[in-house]
Amino acid sequence: MSSMKTALPMSLLALIISVGDAAAAELKPDAINAASIASIKAEKRSSEDPDPAIVRLQVLLDRAGASPGVIDGLAGENVTKAVAGFEAMNGLPVDGRPDAEVVSRLEGDAPIVESYVVSADDAKGLVENIPEDYGEKAKMQSLGYTSVAEKLSERFHMGIDLVNALNPASQFAPGDTVWVVNAGPPREGKVKRIEADRKSGQVLAYAEDGALLAVYPATIGSEDNPAPSGKHKVKGVARMPVYRYDPKRNFKQGKNDKVLTIPKGPNGPVGTVWIDLTEPTYGIHGTPEPKLIDKVGSHGCVRLTNWDAEELAGMVKPGVLVDFVNRSSAAPKK
């Protein structure tokens, strides 16, 4: 059995996808729906303003199972890696560039941006703020979203800044009509094997026949708290987990030196789902800060956006192999 490996060559990790020097246009739904991803170039610079073509590319990649992480309209390594993942999933040369073949296979007729009516439920379960200190977190009833806009941003895989840019005048009150992207339904399938690639910052999910089902950007440990090595297995899945903080087993946060039980919620330390591994204290989980995926280190675990972790959790069962690897080449694995 063979499978395609989607880890990017290290030389590509410096490659930033950009649309050139043109000033970013005011972000409008029609501009995103009409944008051409064929206009995107691969360059070593990027804009700080969301670009309609990048938003479109990110949404199309997400729909295809090659997650760009947060859909924010900004060029960067996670977009490049998502393109590389899509190429590998489709048997194309893996270089992370949105060339004509990638564009032709990604494009479709479904609108990228659609309207959404804020519901009464969207305004429920919010909290005023999320304290940084774990001792303060432990005193809370739940670690929910802090606003309707934040709740919608996660539901639709968007960065909060993009939500606000598309809806600059909205109060996000129940009954309001707002603009959101349509990232499509969660990926479905049965995962047989997972690779957590520390060098590329990716999690790759493979089916029984070796086909690549999904690719996710990931934070995999850090220099101070490295991820485990070798092969492990999925032990189980916990949704909306409480988090047991133990400074003697895990890490030291602030001045907290006692065991704490931190309540569940999307803004909890491990987000909305925990995929437990047979290696004690380690797992694949969500995060309260999706924009930081593969930007800052973790405490040894594998961190995904909440929505990517939820999607992966829906495709795994106890016994699925999780292999921690370090790769620097996109050559196929035999």
Image: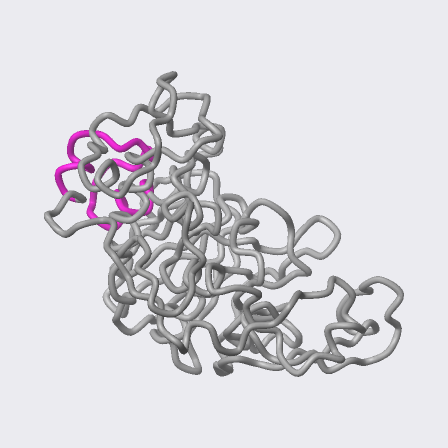
- Asked whether 13 or 241 is in front, the reply is 241
Q: Is residue 277 above or below residue 214?
A: below
Tell me residue 57's x, y (percent). Answer: 28, 41
Q: Is residue 140 above or below residue 152?
A: below
Pinpoint residue 161: horizontal percent, then vertical percent. 48, 46
Left or right of 13? Residue 314 is left
Q: How is the image coloured?
A: one colour
Q: In this figure, what is the number of numbered marks?
A: 0
* Image x and y of residue 294, in percent: 54, 48
**Does residue 1 show up?**
no
Task: State the residue in front, 230 or 80.
Answer: 80
**Is 21 rendered above or below residue 110?**
above
The residue range painted magenta reads 83-105
| Camera sees residue 160 | yes
Residue at (73% x, 82% y) in the render: 261
Task: Judge by depth and name the residue closer to the eye, 327 or 204.
Answer: 204
Q: Is residue 9 magenta?
A: no
Residue located at (78% from left, 76% from top): 246
What residue is drawn where x is 80% and y is 73%?
A: 135
Quadrant of residue 299 in the image? bottom right
| Residue occupying the far left of the picture | 109
- Image: 186 above or below 263: above
- Name the residue: 57% across, 49% down: 292
Q: Was residue 100 drawn as part of the magenta stretch in this picture?
A: yes
Quadrant the N terminus occupies: bottom left
**Rendering coords of residue 253 (x, y %):** 80, 64
Image quadrant in which you'd find residue 244:
bottom right
Most extreme residue toward the top is 21
Compared across the picture, whether 281 is left or right of 318 comes to right
